[in-house]
Amino acid sequence: MQVIKYMFQPHGDERGQLVALEEFKDIPFRIKRVYFMYDTAEGVVRGFHAHKQLEQILVCVHGTCKVLLDNGKEKKVVSLEKPYEGLYVANNIWREMYDFSEDSVLLVLASELYDENDYIRDYDKFLEFVGCK
Ligand code: T46
């Protein structure tokens, strides 16, 4: 499984850093939704699902976290530690987010509006969906 981690270009000067993200330029899809998670309690693991259509970019804009990606055949763990790193998560990938630092803010840029019907929340159904069972 290929892991795609974007390194965004910070516009830095003596005032600090600024990262700008534009659809189809820095992000490979139209951004229809943005959400973020913060105040994540210690030891929490989030996710445990895949999406049928949705593509996303995950950016830990503050603090750190880890993301497990699973395509049904192979699993990879990616650490997000810098606010200029963006992890691309394609459709049909099971994801789990964990090891959130206390100060973490995980920002997500999504290609689709929220739709519960796009979620596969059962791991066995996910394996069937991707033809691994
Ligand atoms: C994903 C990972 C990375 C909404 O009402 N609108 C939204 O856009 C989202 C994302 C969530 N919600 C509601 C649905 C639940 O009642 O917020 C609650 C928490 O969502 P969920 O349990 O799905 O959160 P995570 O962290 O398990 O997963 C989220 C995204 O849902 C998912 O698409 O890929 O982050």
Image (cartoon, helix red, strand yellow):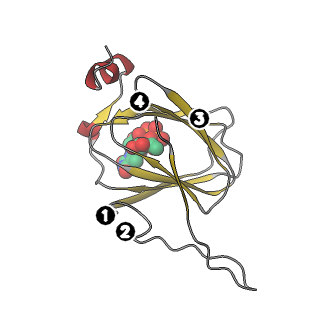
Residue 67, picture quadrant: top right
- Evaluate if marks 2 and 3 touch, with contact meaning CB atoms under 8 Å apart: no
Callout count: 4
Q: In the image, is 54 to the left or to the right of 94? A: left
**Of the pair 4 and 93, the residue shown nearer to us:** 4
Q: Is label 1's Cβ within 8 Å of ligand 1?
A: no
**Of the pair 4 and 58, the residue shown nearer to us:** 4
Q: Secondary structure at mark 3?
A: strand
Q: In the image, is 13 to the left or to the right of 10? A: right
In three-dimensional space, the C-alpha distance between marks 1 and 3, rounded to whole angstroms, equals 26 Å
Q: Secondary structure at mark 1?
A: loop
Residue 8, picture quadrant: bottom right
Check disc 3: other Cα within 10 Å, few if <14, some if 14-19, many if 20+. Answer: some
Q: Position of residue 99 (x, y in %)?
A: 67, 37
The residue drawn where x is 47% and y is 25% is 74
- Evaluate if marks 1 and 2 touch, with contact meaning CB atoms under 8 Å apart: yes
Check disc 2: other Cα within 10 Å, few if <14, some if 14-19, many if 20+. Answer: few
- Evaluate if marks 1 and 4 touch, with contact meaning CB atoms under 8 Å apart: no
Q: Which is in the foreground here, disc 1 or disc 4? A: 4
Q: Which residue is mark 1?
A: 30
Q: Secondary structure at mark 2?
A: loop
Q: Which residue is mark 3?
A: 77
Q: Secondary structure at mark 4?
A: loop
Q: Image quadrant of ligand 1?
A: top left
Q: Amino acid under label 2?
A: Glu
Q: Residue furthest bottom?
A: 14
Q: Amino acid under label 1?
A: Arg
Q: In the image, is 110 to the left or to the right of 67? A: left
Q: Which residue is mark 4?
A: 71
In three-dimensional space, the C-alpha distance between marks 1 and 4, rounded to whole angstroms, equals 23 Å
Say if 63 sits above or below 98 in the image.
below
Which of the two discs, 3 and 4, labels the residue nearer the N terminus? 4
